[in-house]
Image: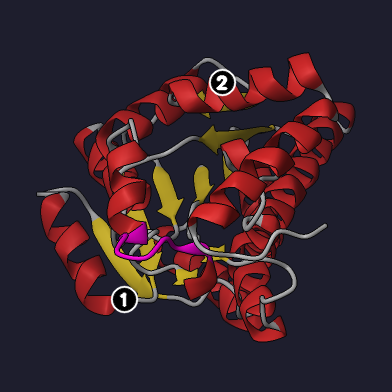
Amino acid sequence: MIVEGRTAVVTGAGSGIGRALAVELAARGARLAISDIDDEALRETAELCGPAEVRTYRLDVADRDAFLAHADEVMRDFGAVHLVVNNAGVAVAASIEEMSFKDLDWILGINLFGVVNGTKAFLPALIASGDGHLVNMSSAFGFIAPPTQSAYSVAKFGVRAFTEALRQEMIGDNRPVTVHCVHPGGVKTNIARTARVHESIVEPGRDFAADFSRGARTTPEKAAEIILRGVERNKARVLVGPDAYFMLGVQQVLGSRYIGIMGRLARVASRRRGGRRQE
């Protein structure tokens, strides 16, 4: 993948992996169209990109019409697009019983349909570039679906299915677009701080975001390095962090048996939180 002088689009670039990708791409000489729903965070990212050509755009990826308009605007501003990273994402932690439809719609709108919207909006431009790359962000929870992470896993399993099917279509139709699905494990980002967390799943006296940060093993900068290396090597599936490899291994070795094991672990955790045991 040639980066220097080419246009890269990154959503969710205000923090975390999106910011790290923008900074790394800028260092490699890319022209950048970066977006986020947080204007101030996006401006900070642009400043970190140094002298590179960077344009910022406020974008809610769940708004399909806005995303289509965004793609048109980027094409007017840059003339071509060679790399698109559908990175924007959020989190919900709640049992299915207690989760609201509002929270479910929120996470699916961003994590799943945001990826679908970005793919559909920019795919014609990537094909027209003659050498396009599309990077869609799934998760290690695109391999297994833990309790209290149903909505997040639905989105990430969906991204995986959508992206893998698209890669096959691009190969089958001999389109000049390479498609990559990224599966990060725990990365030290702000996603847990902005997550919608149901109080019943948090142990008394514990901080959900702090616990997540302690368990996250990979920095955003390392994640960006791994992702771009995977793109350069034409990988269909890019795993980020040892925990991502572990979760893939759990699924491959245990198959559906992992469900019963994790269910029993969830019962133990529920007891610690003072929850009721379901007989």
Q: In which quadrant of the rendered view does residue 209 lie?
A: bottom left
Instruction: Say which of 144 and 8 sits in front.
Output: 144
The amino acid at mark 1 is Asp
Q: Tell me how far mark 2 sits from mark 1, CA to CA.
A: 33 Å
Task: Identify whether 119 is placed above or below 180.
Answer: below
Viewer-nearest of labels 2 and 1?
Answer: 2
Task: Confirm whether the magenta stretch covers residue 207.
Answer: yes
Q: Give the label on residue 151, or none.
A: none
Query: In the image, residue 66 lies at what x, y percent?
Result: 57, 81
Query: In the image, residue 256 lies at what x, y percent?
Result: 85, 30
Q: Give the label on residue 246, or none.
A: 2
SS assignment at label 2: helix
Report which residue position mark 1 lands on: 38
Query: In the image, residue 104 lies at what x, y percent?
Result: 68, 74
- What is the image's colouring? secondary structure
Disc 2: CA contacts within 10 A as few (<14), some (14-19) or many (>=20): few
Which residue does the image show at 79% across and 36% down from the upper left?
Answer: 260
Task: Confirm whether the magenta stretch covers residue 117.
Answer: no
Q: Earlier in the sequence, mark 2 or mark 1?
A: 1
- The C terminus lies in which quarter of the figure? bottom right
Which residue does the image show at 17% across and 49% down from the upper left?
Answer: 49
Q: What stretch is highlighted in magenta?
A: 201-208
**Left or right of 250 on screen, residue 213:** left
Instruction: Say which of 22 and 212 sits in front.
Output: 212
Which residue does the image show at 86% across and 36% down from the upper left?
Answer: 169
